[in-house]
């Protein structure tokens, strides 16, 4: 039985105490207003609220315990209602350790253990000491491997991600020769460490160099940064408005916020939007820089381990066996400079992306990323196929409708406001053909030997590699428009958590026969892969010198 | 390929009716409180919605098909977007039979199949007689157990 770090009792006590205080304050205020009791009640109730909250927080600390058993990670918690939770190691998706600035100062860390079920992180240890966090991460990893190997010898499980094993010998190709002095991880391996320690040193697969970090910061854009700008704008509305008026004045903006012509307001709006975009971009770059500073990806036995962060430090491990699919992402800017990133998707919930998507390579040269992806998944070089030009015609029609709506809205606005040159909105039609072409040209799919590869998207192009044995369901979808053109979209679902930014892999707008064919192939390949996987342990055992005589004991 | 029980049309038409009535009440509220609408428009809108719903129900019934194939449960459905789904038996996590009050009154039942997937994580086969639903549930459970694989998540 283990407890959290003693300091967490203090933190929890203060935290709960403050919520108790607020609760009591609200109750007391309401009571005082309704029943007109003496105001002394507030003075009495509020400290009592704090005290009760504090006591609850401390009690929670004493009633919270966790334990590592040979097969499960157990957590018992709850003051009034108790909850005992057991997470089998075999079901653990990933283990993350998070350290904020203050936490690092005091040597503390938050540990999250994810399994596939539920809508949130299954086990949160908030917080333990740094050393304990590292021990937990290591122990969970070790015991997961152990319980897996126990099963494998029972003949019920099979080797994980075959492709990974094949590529094993050369996986560190992605790693460029270490030039800098701090290229430590595997170099000082031979040093004075015990054999036990050495087992848990990662083989480094990738580390983000300063140049790549800077490129990644400036060549990626986070939508969340826009929300940050809006928040900032709400926070300090007055000075920001003054500043914007002052800046736009030389360009023909209004003298003051109240006195202006429609024309000057348009200019003010344009200036504001430009400022907003620049600010959001800088915020996004700063955030990316801080959170991916010092990114390292490594491998310990059957786990991927990563570490990153300047102020807030994240580290985590993902069992390779739990990886559902791998996605290579790039945006137009990254494509221009020939870079791309790679993500691995699991069924758990990742620390920052919401879904179970983890950055494995934030950004590196395209060639290296693709080569690494191919080795990691065991994929042969994909030869992408593209939907026919009928699909492009469909996008042409679709975007024309959008442009028409834009023009109609502009016209509508011109009716109720002083806007005159509404017909300039017709310029939107100029964007239609390139937009349709770019969408079409960035679509692709490849039906491989063991994997299906799906590529789509222009702004954030995603190339997803799905092993057939990870497929959950296959759907062929045809809307009324698609039926008219004889097209269909194929949705291939895996168990990776859905998130808003990463919708289910879909092969868009291929001919119906093609969609049906790929649909059928996915199903066949899944069955074949499953059959192969269920047979292989027997095969493996008979390959061992002393195995053959046991063969007859094995159930068919 | 198996179709649904024809009585399912009654259920869907009834649902369209309920929706139309709710819409009618909302519109009547708007009419009273905010903006007065001609009665003809009100009745017309409600009637049209109901009619569309009824046509949709009939079309949906005509399109719905399902089949137990060698490796997967195969479903076809959809009026506006036509969807063909294959749920491999290995991927079935668990199977429910369910029925709501109207379904119960009509003597119908649904089978819901859960997978670990993120999309269509639950696949519903509505409009089955309780016996058929029970049988389908049993078959799916047996097939799922038979083809169990442990590598999903």
Image (cartoon, helix red, strand yellow):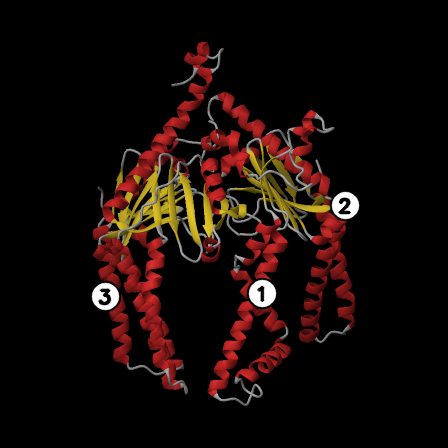
- The answer to the question of whether label 1 and label 2 lie on touching residues, with beta carbons closer than 8 A, is no
Q: Nearer the viewer, mark 2 or mark 3?
A: 2
Residue position for label 3: B51
Q: Nearer the viewer, mark 3 or mark 1?
A: 1
Q: Is residue A238 left or right of residue A481?
A: right
Residue position for label 2: A6
Kindly report the distance in space between the C-alpha atoms of the residues bearing marks 3 and 1: 47 Å
Identify whether A144 is placed above or below A438: above
Position of residue A194 measured from the top left corner of the image (x, y, whole percent)? 71, 26
Identify whether B21 is placed above or below A201: below
Residue position for label 1: A228
Chain holding disc 3: B
Q: Nearest the camera: A39 or A519?
A: A519
Position of residue A466 measured from the top left corner of the image (x, y, whole percent)? 41, 41
Kindly report the distance in space between the C-alpha atoms of the residues bearing marks 1 and 2: 35 Å
Q: Residues within 10 Å of mark 2 (few under 14, many from 20)?
A: some
Q: Of the numbered discs in the image, which one, if any, rests on residue A391? A: none
Q: Nearest the camera: A185 or A415?
A: A185
The answer to whether residue A43 shows anywhere in this view is yes
Q: Is residue A307 left or right of residue A118?
A: right
Chain holding disc 1: A
Kindly report the distance in space between the C-alpha atoms of the residues bearing marks 2 and 3: 67 Å
């Amino acid at each position: 039985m283990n407890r959290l770090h003693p300091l967490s009792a203090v933190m929890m006590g203060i935290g709960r105490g403050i919520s108790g205080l607020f609760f009591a304050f609200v109750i007391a205020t309401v009571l005082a207003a309704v029943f007109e009791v003496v105001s002394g009640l507030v003075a009495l109730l509020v400290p009592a609220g704090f005290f009760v909250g504090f006591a609850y927080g401390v009690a929670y600390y004493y009633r919270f315990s966790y334990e590592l058993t040979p097969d499960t990670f157990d957590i018992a918690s709850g003051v009034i209602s108790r909850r005992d939770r057991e997470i089998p190691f075999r079901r653990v998706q990933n283990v993350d350790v998070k350290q904020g600035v203050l936490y690092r100062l005091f040597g503390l860390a938050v540990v999250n253990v994810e399994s596939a079920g539920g809508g949130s992180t299954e086990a949160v240890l908030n917080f333990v000491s740094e050393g304990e966090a590292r021990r937990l991460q290591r122990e969970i990893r070790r015991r997961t491997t152990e319980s897996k190997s126990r099963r494998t010898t029972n003949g019920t499980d099979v080797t994980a991600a075959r492709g990974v094993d094949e590529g094993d010998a050369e996986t560190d190709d992605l790693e460029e020769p270490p030039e800098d002095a701090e290229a430590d991880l595997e170099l000082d391996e031979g040093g004075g460490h015990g054999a036990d320690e050495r087992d848990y040193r990662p083989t480094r697969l990738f580390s983000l160099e300063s140049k790549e970090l800077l490129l990644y910061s400036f060549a990626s854009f986070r939508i969340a940064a826009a929300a940050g700008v809006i928040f900032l704008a709400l926070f300090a509305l007055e000075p920001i408005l003054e500043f914007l008026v002052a800046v736009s004045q030389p360009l023909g903006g209004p003298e003051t916020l109240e006195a202006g012509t429609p024309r000057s307001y348009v200019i003010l709006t344009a200036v504001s939007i430009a400022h907003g975009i620049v600010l959001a971009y800088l915020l996004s770059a700063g955030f990316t820089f801080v959170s991916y500073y010092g990114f390292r990806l490594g491998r310990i036995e059957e786990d991927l381990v990563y570490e990153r962060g300047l102020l807030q430090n994240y580290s985590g491990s993902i069992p390779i066996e739990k990886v559902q699919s791998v996605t290579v992402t790039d945006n137009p800017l990254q494509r221009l400079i020939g870079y791309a990133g790679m993500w691995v998707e699991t069924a758990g919930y990742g620390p920052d992306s919401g879904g179970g998507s983890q950055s494995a390579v934030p950004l590196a040269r395209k060639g290296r990323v693709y080569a690494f992806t191919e080795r990691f998944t065991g994929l042969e070089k994909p030869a992408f196929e593209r939907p026919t030009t009928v699909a492009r015609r469909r996008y042409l029609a679709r975007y024309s409708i959008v442009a028409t709506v834009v023009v109609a809205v502009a016209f509508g606005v011109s009716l109720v406001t002083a806007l005159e040159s509404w017909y300039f909105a017709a310029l939107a039609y100029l964007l239609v053909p390139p937009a349709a072409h770019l969408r079409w040209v960035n679509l692709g799919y490849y039906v491989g030997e063991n994997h299906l590869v799906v590529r789509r998207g222009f702004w954030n192009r995603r190339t997803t590699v799905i092993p057939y044995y990870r497929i959950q369901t296959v759907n062929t979808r045809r809307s009324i428009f698609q039926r008219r053109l004889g097209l269909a979209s194929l949705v291939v679902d895996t168990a990776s958590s859905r998130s808003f930014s990463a919708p289910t892999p879909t092969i868009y707008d291929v001919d119906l026969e093609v969609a049906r064919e790929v649909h059928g192939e996915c199903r066949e390949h899944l069955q074949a892969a499953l059959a192969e996987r269920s047979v292989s342990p027997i095969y493996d055992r008979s390959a061992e010198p002393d195995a053959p005589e046991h063969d007859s004991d094995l159930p068919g | 390929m198996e179709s649904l029980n024809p009585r399912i049309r009654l259920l869907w038409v009834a649902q369209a009716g309920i929706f139309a009535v709710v819409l009618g009440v909302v519109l009547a509220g708007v009419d009273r409180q905010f903006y007065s609408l001609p009665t003809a428009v009100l009745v017309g809108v409600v009637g049209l919605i109901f009619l569309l719903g009824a046509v949709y129900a009939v079309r949906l019934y005509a399109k719905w098909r399902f089949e137990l194939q060698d490796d997967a449960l195969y479903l076809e459905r959809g009026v506006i977007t036509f969807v063909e789904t294959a749920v491999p038996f290995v991927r079935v996590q668990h199977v429910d039979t369910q029925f709501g009050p109207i379904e119960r009154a009509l003597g119908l039942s649904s089978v819901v199949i859960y997978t670990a997937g993120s999309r269509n994580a639950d696949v519903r086969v509505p409009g089955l007689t309780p016996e058929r639903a029970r049988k389908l549930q049993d078959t799916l459970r047996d097939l799922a157990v038979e083809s169990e694989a442990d590598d999903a998540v």
